[in-house]
């Protein structure tokens, strides 16, 4: 707050100072180890998710999705906004807000400007998708804090939230449809028709054949998510192994 130290340094030092003031100085070592034991498994999961989904995004895993959305939309604001919602929900699986916004904005914002769709629609959809998916996945920032505080396994935290994530995703898509209709009415048919021709030409020019690597990455990602949700033995083995090593 006084801009004399970074947030990380200030938080660590303040904990130590107040522990000493409260007469807990002799127990600081044990308290630190207990804290590390509590958060280490979740931290490993978060680190893995950031690295894994970052690599998948760099490899172009979501590029076919964005190209398909533009190809199907053909300049129609309703289809573009709904496609934005679908893309945002998929990209938000990485649990990291920064990369999600970068991908969504880089893929869709030029299209919004070309057609004349209000960029606030894009921002609203991105925020809702990130809060619904990234905020609830067990490797997202909000969930990692909840898991650490409650002392739960990631799967036990995540499983009860799946119905809410599905309902929230459907609500976002419906809301995107409503906002898309409003934008279609505001922009007008003439401008939409003009922009659709340019978008179709650009998509055709950038058309790329989906390689076997994209399919492999897709199947690997799908298998990973299913394994985490279903608590397959291998995932649970490594999760508890990390917890055991931290405790010892």
Image (spheres, rainbow, N blue to C red):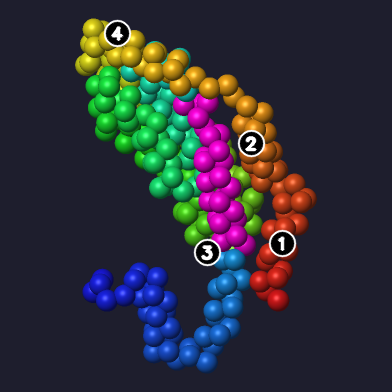
Residue designated by label 4: 193
Query: Which residue is drawn at the image coordinates 42% and 76% (left, top)?
Result: 12
* Residue on which the image places disc 1: 240
* Secondary structure mostly taken by the magenta-highlighted segment of the chain: helix
Q: Is tag 4's residue or tag 3's residue first in the polypeptide sequence?
A: 3
Disc with the residue nearer the chain's start (2 vs 1)? 2
- Would you place residue 133 above or below residue 107 in this image? below
Quarter holding the C terminus? bottom right
Which residue shows up at 39% across the image and 84% down it?
18
Q: Can residue 200 be seen in this view?
A: yes
In the image, is residue 64 part of the stretch drawn in magenta? yes
Nearer the camera: disc 2 or disc 1: 2
Q: How far apart are marks 4 and 3 (CA)?
A: 53 Å
Where is residue 211? Give x, y as percent.
Answer: 63, 27
| Of the image marks 2 and 4, the number of the one nearer the N terminus | 4
Q: Disc 4 vs disc 3: Cβ atoms closer than 8 Å?
A: no
Identity of the residue drawn at 56% across and 34% down: 61
- Provide the residue span drawn in magenta: 41-66
Q: How many residues crowd mark 3 within 10 Å: few (<14), some (14–19), many (20+)?
A: few
């Amino acid at each position: 707050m006084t801009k004399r130290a970074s947030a990380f340094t200030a938080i660590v030092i303040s904990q130590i100072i107040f522990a000493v003031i409260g007469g807990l100085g002799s127990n600081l070592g044990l308290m630190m180890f207990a804290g590390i034991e509590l958060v280490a498994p979740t931290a490993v999961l978060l680190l893995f998710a950031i690295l894994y989904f970052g690599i998948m995004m760099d490899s172009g895993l979501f590029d076919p999705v964005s190209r398909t959305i533009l190809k199907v939309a053909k300049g129609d604001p309703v289809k573009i906004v709904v496609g934005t919602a679908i893309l945002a929900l998929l990209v938000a699986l990485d649990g990291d807000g920064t990369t999600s916004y970068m991908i969504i904005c880089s893929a869709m914002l030029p299209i919004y400007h070309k057609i004349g769709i209000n960029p606030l629609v894009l921002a609203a959809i991105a925020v809702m998708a990130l809060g619904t998916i990234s905020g609830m996945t067990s490797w997202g920032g909000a969930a990692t804090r909840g898991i650490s505080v409650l002392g739960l396994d990631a799967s036990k935290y995540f499983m009860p939230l799946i119905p809410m994530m599905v309902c929230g995703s459907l609500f976002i898509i419906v809301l995107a449809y409503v906002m898309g209709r409003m934008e279609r009415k505001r922009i007008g048919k003439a401008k939409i028709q003009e922009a659709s021709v340019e978008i179709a030409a650009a998509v055709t020019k950038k058309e790329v054949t989906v390689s076997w690597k994209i399919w492999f990455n897709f199947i690997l990602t799908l298998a990973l998510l299913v394994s985490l949700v279903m608590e397959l033995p291998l995932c649970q083995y490594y999760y508890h192994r990390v917890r055991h090593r931290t405790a010892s």
